[in-house]
Image: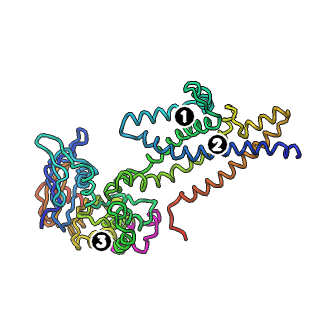
Amino acid sequence: MSYVSEILPPLLQGAVVSVELFVITLVLSLPLGLPFAFGEMSRFRPIRWICKVFVFVFRGTPLMLQLFFFYFFFPLALNIDIPAFPAAVLTFVLNYAAYFAEIYRGGILSIDRGQYEAAHSLGLSKAQTTFGIIIPQAMRVVLPPVSNEAITLVKDTALASVISMSEMMRVSEGIVNRDYNLTAYVVAAAIYLFFTFILTLVLNHVEAHFSTYTRKEN
Amino acid sequence: MSAILEMKNINKYFGDFHALKDINFSVEDGETAAIIGPSGSGKSTLLRCINCLTKITTGSITLNGKTFVDTPEGGAAKYIPDKELKSVISQTGMVFQHFNLFPHMTCLENVIYAPIKVKKVPKDKAVKRAEELLDLVGMLEHKDQYPEMISGGQKQRVAIARGLAMDPEIMLFDEPTSALDPEITGEVLNVMKSLSEQHVTMIVVTHEMGFAREVADKVAFMNQGELLETGTSEEIFTQPKSQRLQDFLSSMIR
């Protein structure tokens, strides 16, 4: 037990980095997915193709490889210095935006054509239709898959260890190698589980809020 | 009385399919017009051309004195710019076969949304007007319910209130009772009948022959993309001229 209390502070420090990466990624990639989703459905072929290629590339290559690209290759090619954390944020945001774009696209396509026709017949503008009618309904459809991605992201943050970012996975790896003791992995697993547990509770709450259109309470 | 809607030489092609064949159709202010005919005859297509849900291939349409689409000699139909077109469209209200209420809004919110967003009516005024309209269609007590919670007939009555809330010059009904149980079509037809009695200009695409006969001032019969006969309900139902209309009516009455 005293060993656990000895390794806990550095692990928690790593956990803070993991959570930071998680939160920043989510906050930036959730909105960023939307323009890509609409871009993929754009009438303008160049925009459509750019967005499709973006999604194709980021969904079609390993996240780890993308991390290497933005951490090692990108700085070399542009002759700039990108520290691990911003490199990881950039990679994760783009990668998750690509996934969210596809989820959003599916949600938007699931909305019945009659909704657009009703909006049209009432004289609503494109923007009013999109933001007032379509997106609020698509929200309900996309929430379960988005929640799923959010849970995946908790665990994906561990991948940032490959670019020497001292998030929780890398910290626990260091402790295991130093002490020849696997306890750090067990503790890290418990902390990951704790995060996903809290996140699941939050997401369930959000989903329940959007899941049905019933009589307004209170 | 003057024509509030005038459609001239309307042709519509979907690819090679000639859906509307040189149709001339007009509706007077305050009139109730019914469009009848077999399925696939182009009734709904004709109705949807009036608020630009479907764009015509050639012809001209004038609504409330504004010609929003016209066709130069030998050319294709040319619409006025989108922005002006929007204001023409907002002079029409439409009721759909499948209601198309916004499921994420309560009945009241469904009715006030467009007046507030499009016409910039202050919210309290919009609510007051919406409550009057919901009362008119007998749905005031359900105003805070979501569409999911109410029956098809109730949804359609809310949809009628939503259409009326924009104070349209003309109301378009696209088979408003076709998706309803026969038992509850009456509640929707009664609302429409009372609108007709209040001289709301309306065009109703319908399979309800009883309604067309009793309520419509003018009845148009369409068959295979052609407007075969137009007349008073008396003329259409008691003295049908074409063999096709006679056959259609006898098959509908059975």
Q: Residue at x 82, y 42 (%)?
A: A7
Label 3 SS? helix
Q: Mark 1 — residue? A: A59
Residue A75: percent from left, percent from top: 59, 28
Kind of residue indicated by mark 2: Leu
Residue at horizontal 43%, vertical 40%? Answer: A39
Q: Point out the residue furthest to the front here.
A: A80
Q: Which residues are magenta?
A: B136-154
Assign the C terminus of chain B to one quadrant of the image: bottom left
Say left or right for B239 vs B207: left
Residue name at image x 24 percent, y 59 percent: B252
Kindly identify which residue carries mark 3.
Answer: B190
Chain letter of disc 1 in the image: A
Q: Residue B138 location, x and y as percent?
A: 37, 74
Q: Look at label 1 and name its amino acid.
A: Arg
Residue A108 vs residue B127, the one in the foreground: B127
